[in-house]
Image (tube, grey):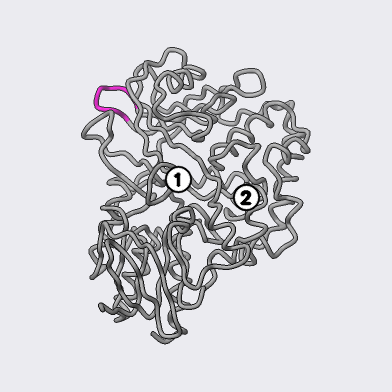
Amino acid sequence: MERTDVVVVGGGFAGLRTARNLSEANQSAVLLEAANRVGGRAYSRESKTDPGTLVEVGGAYLHRHHHGRLAAEIDRYGIRTQPAAPFTVFRNRLGQGEHNSAFPVPIEEATEAERVLYSLLRDAHRIDLEAGLENQGLEDLDISVKEYFDTLDMPPVTDQLLRSWCWNMMGQRLEDASALWALQFVASHGYSVFGVVLSLDEVMSEGTGALTSAIAKDVPDLRLGEPVHGLQQDADGVEVLYGKDRVLRAGHVVVAAPLNAMGSIAFEPPLTGSRANVVAEGHGGRGLKLLIQVQGVPEGISCTGDGVFPTLYDYLPSSDGGRILVAFTDRDSVDPSDDAAIEAGVHHYLPDAVVVGTDCHDWTEDPYVRAPWVSPRVGQFTRAHKSLGEQHGRIHFAGSDVSLLFPGYIEGALETADRVIGELETHPY
């Protein structure tokens, strides 16, 4: 039987950083990735509507102030970055009207908007980012975003603005998404509401694939197309069942797979308690990132409001002289193959736009991911949150879905890689 010190399951940013750093520390590490590429939910490829144009169909944005580990990786490999597309033209539909300015809240709502922001910040400050949401008596905040916002009695423009951006960030309808998770985003960005939006600051000029490919070259034993089916551990190690009837024995295993993909791995002994229940359920994220190629839309467009796309904004130029826009919504509200619904969603904000086509990677249907960025169902993460990333004997857990500081972000994946490397340093192989 083949043996190694550590098996890393999953070739996203967490798995790549873990396997590379272990190898640099002279530990033998095998990285098994189920798909035929690395990167996980960071995925840059050629546009399906505009061949020759590179697009990001997964996570892409960074902010050097918040995302220090990612910035360090970018600098290490000499990856070029550029500012995210600036917004200069606004077509917002908020509070039964159009408010077409960079700061759409009208002056008559300023005092009430300040009150609402104070309430959000007050509640976000109850969150200790290190403690885990299940350990802090936060159940009163683990209600739906809709219910939480209804209690704030917001004026109309402020109300619609916050609902739109929360829908964007949660990747779920507001009646399904947890208000506590929205507040977690605020806490993660320095306890700042504006920090969440302003974190969409830079992108990698050659796509996230430039960085994941560079890290992958520093992983000595990387095996693609090798899904892991089972992990059977005893006092001395773990047998990893993968591929077609293949077995690899390791001293330890790092599971750096998405939370919703963990349910397809048979753990022996099994996971227990609330963690086992949440892994079996999977988180509720259903977010869609649509890349919509259009004609007749000005550069720098930004739309926020009450449409089926809570946000719709400029991304990059297309080769035909038009633009590619980014729209966020969720899989339950829009079918990404429904061209008529997508066109109607664009026309809600931009009635004169000509829709050329839509590109999307439907992460919910991806067999190796089964969901986009992490977004718990109401009540899930006050049952199990920090425990999702805790050791299970010789099995360790990494990935942005189990990050405490930056869940759902590339930075969160890198954060958890550092945590599990620290765990491994204290255990014999």
Name the residue furthest top: 352
Q: Position of residue 206 (x, y in %)?
A: 27, 46
Q: Residue at x 50, y 56 (%)?
A: 401
137 drawn magenta: no
The residue indicated by pointer 2 is 181
Q: Position of residue 406 (x, y in %)?
A: 52, 57
Indicate the quadrant containing the C terminus: top left, top right, bottom left or bottom right: bottom left
Kind of residue sitting beneath label 1: Asp
321 drawn magenta: yes
Judge by depth and name the residue closer to the eye, 225 or 302.
Answer: 225
Q: Is residue 362 left or right of residue 345?
A: left
Judge by depth and name the residue closer to the eye, 65 or 212.
Answer: 212
The residue indicated by pointer 1 is 201
Name the residue furthest front: 245
| SS of the residue under disc 1 | loop
Indicate which disc, 1 or 2, sits on the residue closer to the N terminus.
2
Give the spatial CA distance, label 1 vs label 2.
22 Å
Q: Residue at x 25, y 35 (%)?
A: 53
Image quarter of residue 158: top right
Magenta range is: 317-323
Q: Is residue 365 left or right of residue 321?
A: right
Above/below status of 20 relative to 407? below
Kind of residue sitting beneath label 2: Trp
Judge by depth and name the residue closer to the eye, 236 or 131.
Answer: 236
- Which label sits in the foreground, 1 or 2? 2
Q: Residue at x 25, y 77 (%)?
A: 2
Q: Is residue 308 left or right of residue 221?
A: right
Above/below status of 269 relative to 283? below
